[in-house]
Amino acid sequence: MGFATVMLILFNKPFNVLCQFTDKSGRATLADFVDVPRVYPAGLLDYDSEGLVVLTDDGRLQARIADPRFKLVKTYWVQVEGVPDEAALVQLRAGVWLKDKGKREAQRTLPAAVRVIAEPPLWPRVPPVRFRLSVPTAWLELSIREGRNRQVRRMTAAVGLPTLRLVRVQVGDWSLRGLQSGAWKKVHV
């Protein structure tokens, strides 16, 4: 009896690319970069975010990666407008209150691991981030175990630090290490 091989692809999604294979509006999609049949993203990454997208042809693995019940850690490098103070970091670590669409009341996010980091060695974003010369920026490394709609952006905004650039660098044990923007590679499961 043979065993089916699970395909797993790590893709470094560029800015302004949809995390799906088709788009009626003509925007860039995964199909413009990944020419592998029958693979699907295991969790989404917003159009205006960059970084690691895991694709697989195994539905159970896809669900396990994407489903918040399994609480797979996702780590992001986040460039924010402003300089984080200790109070903002404490709030992020404790969880912030967010009102999700269709919900009556705000709910607290799960606690996040967060720290201020030096500017990471990233590829240039196209188009570049627009800065306000009078407002400083900072970089955070933020790890969460859930995946609400635009969660990281909403969390940083809730503590007064609007997100300028968001790059997912790790999902569980898989990372972007060695992948340039728009590149992908197959990995063994």
Image (spheres, rainbow, N blue to C red):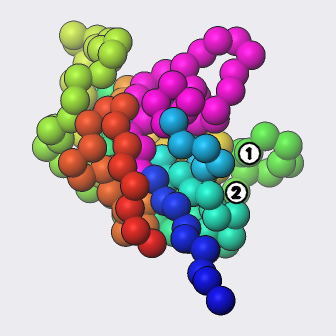
Q: Earlier in the sequence, mark 2 or mark 1?
A: 1
Q: Amino acid at mark 2?
A: Gln
Residue at 23% across, 23% down: 124
Q: Vertically, is 41 above or below 133?
A: below
Residue that mark 1 sits on: 100
Q: Nearer the viewer, residue 174 or 82?
A: 174
Q: Report, in whole angstroms, how far the alpha carbon at label 2 lies from the one at label 1.
A: 8 Å
Residue at 46% across, 30% down: 33
Mark 2 crowd level (few <14, some 14–19, many ≥20, 10 Å Cα):
few
Callout 2 touching callout 1 (CB < 8 Å): yes
Residue at 65% across, 89% down: 1
Residue that mark 2 sits on: 107
Q: Going by the image, does 11 lie left or right of 6? A: left
Q: Which residues are magenta?
A: 10-34
Q: Vertically, is 96 above or below 162?
A: below
Task: Estimate the x, y position of residue 189 in percent, counting from the top left.
Answer: 45, 72
Task: Estimate the x, y position of residue 179 in percent, counting from the top left.
Answer: 27, 44
